[in-house]
Amino acid sequence: MSSVIIYNFYSLFSKMFKRKNSRKYPKNIVPAKRVRSSCYFDDLPPEIIVHIFSFIPIAELSKNICLVCKKWKKMLATPSLWKTIEADREVPTKILSKWVRDSPLLQQIHLSNRNDTDEIVSTIGKYSRNLQYIKLVNCLGSKASVCIKSKNLCRLMRRCRKLDTIHFSGVKILSCKFFQLLTTRRAFGHKRKSCSYFGPVNGRQMKSLLESLSKSELYGSASIAAAKKKIFIDLDNQSLESFEDLWRDMVNYDQTVNEMNLVPAEDNQP
């Protein structure tokens, strides 16, 4: 008896449900179709997606974008995305070193407020032969030393033949060889743009720089400034002796100069 009641109830419910959903629409009305959800961004060609990624900072790409999916992570390995690297103290040393090693097309690098410059500069010298621009701002050689090792800087300048622009500010370098290399053609190649250094310079370093400048045609002029006095020097057809009095008057009480800005000869032609 119970089975018959259950069967009749099921039959009645089925008929009601069928009658409710058997509504007929007028001929001129078409029921709306369900829109299929999809990501049209994934339908773009890989080249377009990579181009879009090129407008996103490297730190954002490596920290967040790479976690979206395996496809995007694979695209982020495209060398063209890694032509410019900017890193402050927030980027760990191991990650920054990996960025440099995996960036054969690296052209520009900007480091600021870091205490691992010796290690990073050494890595750049080994892997970044296409480097054209380097900028160091308020960087220390390591956690144990304020000074940046000249050995790594000199190796970088010798190996990176395309390097034509150097900007150092708030750094300390205890080397004469580095300042000599700033003026050599071999370190910069044929197309030179500019070189600026803002930091302490001792007498030996300044003498090495002036001697190299007097023998080189790389720069047509150099501006050198003390803390409260700025002097423009035209190095064309000048001998080293002409700078002795200037150097004596320019050096401040602690025997350091606070700024040097070297200008290429081709930029000073009338």
Image (cartoon, helix red, strand yellow):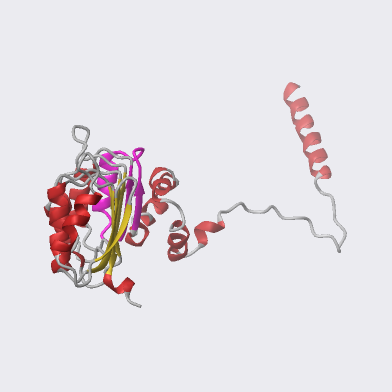
Asked if the magenta segment contains residue 74, the reply would be no
Relative to 64, residue 224 above or below: below
Q: Nearer the viewer, residue 59 or 145?
A: 145
Asked if the magenta segment contains residue 108, the reply would be yes
Relative to 57, residue 163 above or below: below
What is the x, y in percent for residue 227? 32, 45
Residue at figure coordinates x 75%, y 27% from the top left? 6
What is the x, y in percent for residue 266? 29, 74
Residue farthest top in this picture: 2
Residue at figure coordinates x 15%, y 51% from the top left? 205
Residue 268 placement: quadrant = bottom left
What is the x, y in percent for residue 149? 15, 44
What is the x, y in percent for residue 223? 30, 59
Residue at figure coordinates x 79%, y 31% from the top left? 8
Quadrant into which the N terminus falls: top right
Q: Which residues fall within the magenta stretch? A: 84-112
Residue at figure coordinates x 50%, y 57% from the top left? 42
User: Is residue 136 left or right of 66 when viewed as pictured?
Assistant: left
Q: Nearer the viewer, residue 127 or 139?
A: 139
Instruction: Tell me if residue 126 can be seen.
Output: no
Q: Nearer the viewer, residue 179 or 247?
A: 247
